[in-house]
Every structure is written in C-alpha cells, then in structure tokens.
Amino acid sequence: MTDKLSQGLVQVYTGTGKGKSTAALGLALRAVGHGFKVVVIQYMKGSAYSGELFSSQRLPNLEIKQFGRGCPYASLIREGHMKCKGCGDCFLKDNDQSRAEFKEYVDLAYAYSEEVLSDGETDIVILDEINNALRYDLLTVEEVLDLVSLKGEKTELIMTGRGFADQILEVADLVTEMKAVKHPYQEGISSRRGIEY
C-alpha cells in the first residue's frame, strides 16, 4: 500500500441540497480505510454531539476539529436524553450580535487550516462549511484561494458549503452541486440523531 496519494486534487461540494458534509465525510471514511491521514476542519460548527466526532475517536488517522459556538444542550443531546431542537443558537444568523465571536472562530479555523495544509503530513484536508465564513463576510475569496495554493501536490483538498464564488469553482478539479428536491424538514420532521447529526 502506498503511503501517499498519487495525485491530490481540489474538490467542492456545494448547492442547496443536503449531503455536502456527508459526502466529504464518506470520502474521509474511505481514505482512512486505505491508511491515509485525514483532517476535517469544521468552520462555524461547534455542536460537540455530532456522530462524526464520535467516529473520529474510534478511527485511527481521522481528526475532526470544530471551530464554532457550542450548543447549550450538547451534553444532553450527546447522551441521547434530548433531540436537537433546531433552535439555531449554535449558528450565526444575519442579525446576530456576536459576529466578533464567530470572526474569532473563523480566524482560528483559518490559522489551523494553514498549518495543516502546510505541514505535508496530511493526505486529505476537508474544510467543512468554509463557505459559510465567506457568505457572512468573515473570510474573503482571496483567503480561500490562498489556502488552495498551500495544498501540496499529493494532498486532496475538499471544501463544502452553499454558493461558492466562481473564482473558487474555477480552481477546483471536481465540483458537485447538491440539489434540493425534497426534504423531511418540509414535512415537519426535525433533525435526527445519526442521520443529520
């Protein structure tokens, strides 16, 4: 078995449909199965109860770091005593008064992204929901392109989020757009443990 990818590319999972992070995490699972080192950097996420965090504790070579506001109910949700209510307190909203807090999280995530992409030790780097930071003007397109330029020749870079700028799509080798056709939320079915988180 080789210890490095033969060639590292840039992938983008975007669109209005569900499955962007899920697709990236599926790729992470596949890569870990081949012995590759995977680092997932979750921008503006801080739930501490999502299933992928528990999986990363059980799988060698898979590291997931969250940079976002925590959920006040995380321990209850993690232990199965409560369901995520979808209150959105852990996400930045357009009228949120705590932009400075989220900017600090994004700056920390960005610095860690630079470190991981520059170290040459990581085979797959996933910048999960990095486009949220762009959508809320907490990062610039130029900063994201700078991260792409740090990627080593044998490092795969995967970015997720809705509505990427054309400049980022142009440098990507693979772009997949998830299209929303039908979603259980439309029928009043809330997030489910093990499926949405």
Image: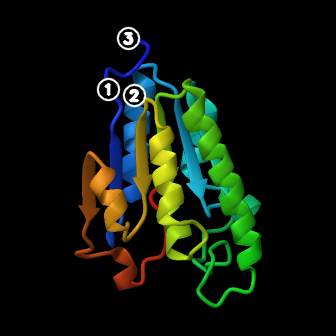
Residue at point 60% right, 45% down? 113
In the rendered view, tell whether residue 190 sits above or below residue 155.
below
Badge 1: few (under 14), some or many (20 or more) residues near its Cα, within 10 Å? Answer: few
Q: Amino acid at mark 1?
A: Gln
In the image, 189 versus 171, the foreground residue is: 171
Is 26 on the left-hand or right-hand side of 119?
left
Q: Position of residue 116 (x, y in %)?
A: 60, 36
State the residue position of label 1. 7
The amino acid type, in three-letter code, at marker 2 is: Glu
Foreground of the two, 93 or 167? 167
Q: Residue furthest bottom?
A: 95
Q: Residues within 10 Å of mark 3 (few under 14, many from 20)?
A: few
Q: Secondary structure under badge 1? A: loop
Residue matched to label 3: 2
Image quarter hosting the N terminus: top left
Of label 2 and label 3, which has the lower sequence position?
3
Q: Secondary structure at mark 2?
A: loop
